[in-house]
Image: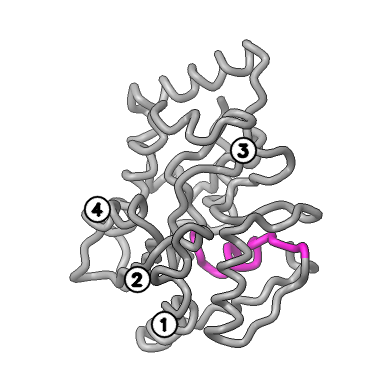
Amino acid sequence: MDVQIHPSWKIALQKEFSQPYFADIVAFLKTEKAAGKTIYPKGSHIFNAFNHTPFNDVKVVILGQDPYHGPNQAHGLSFSVLEGVKPPPSLVNIFKELKADIGINLPNNYGNLTNWANQGVLLLNATLTVRDGEPNSHAKIGWTTFTDAVIETLSDQKQHLIFILWGKFAQEKASLIDEGKHYILQSAHPSPFSADKGFFGSKPFSTTNQLLIKNGYNPIDWSLLPNNV
């Protein structure tokens, strides 16, 4: 597999691409395809988060778990869906909190978060691929080793990043982050099963912008701009 990833990430993660576990990921995906399995997102989108948010531009990290496993949903950005796809329940709740937090109304039936990624929000899933209709089917093929290395590299080499960790799975990654250098915003997951247990009212968007301004960075425009995607 030709790793279609931004050059800045190729440099930052160069030792990961030469590790045996990464070769195992590539071999597994080739085997899946040879067996006729449908994998999401498509190959050119697997590293979309990195291509839209180069290493030097990262200001915020929103960590997801697994790509969406339905047709035409996943495109390499956590929580985001392609144009024309109805936003899934967790994304709907993210938009509800966004409106309550900073008053932004987002378009109906539009859930592409590329505009966030282009401003320095790394929309990172812990697992970067999934088999059609089978959530977490690629969770144990090595991707978490790779994305843990991403988090650790960001923590080691950057300053004043804001890590947004929604839910228990994401919060377990806090141990990879140097809290002396970075900010960690934690709350319940936006899933309908947990959003009312601490996600709603957590104000992650306004808090993030306050912290960015405090450290001399431009705040994020959390609106979605179709002409920029």
Q: Are marks 2 and 4 in contact (CB under 8 Å)?
A: no
On the image, the x and y values in percent for residue 6 come to: 54, 48
Q: Are marks 4 and 1 in contact (CB under 8 Å)?
A: no
Q: Are marks 1 and 2 in contact (CB under 8 Å)?
A: yes
Q: Are marks 3 and 4 in contact (CB under 8 Å)?
A: no
* Front of the two marks 1 and 3: 3
Where disc 2 sits, the SS reads strand
Asked whether, in this view, residue 141 is left or right of residue 84, the answer is: left
Crowding near the residue tagged with mark 4, few <14, some 14–19, many ≥20 C-alpha atoms within 10 Å:
some
- Residue at 51 percent across and 39 percent down: it is 128
The structure's colour scheme is one colour
Specify the amino acid type for callout 4: Leu
How far is disc 3 from disc 4 in space, using C-alphas?
27 Å
Q: Which mark is residue 207?
A: 1
Specify the amino acid type for callout 1: Thr
How far is disc 4 from disc 1 in space, using C-alphas?
22 Å
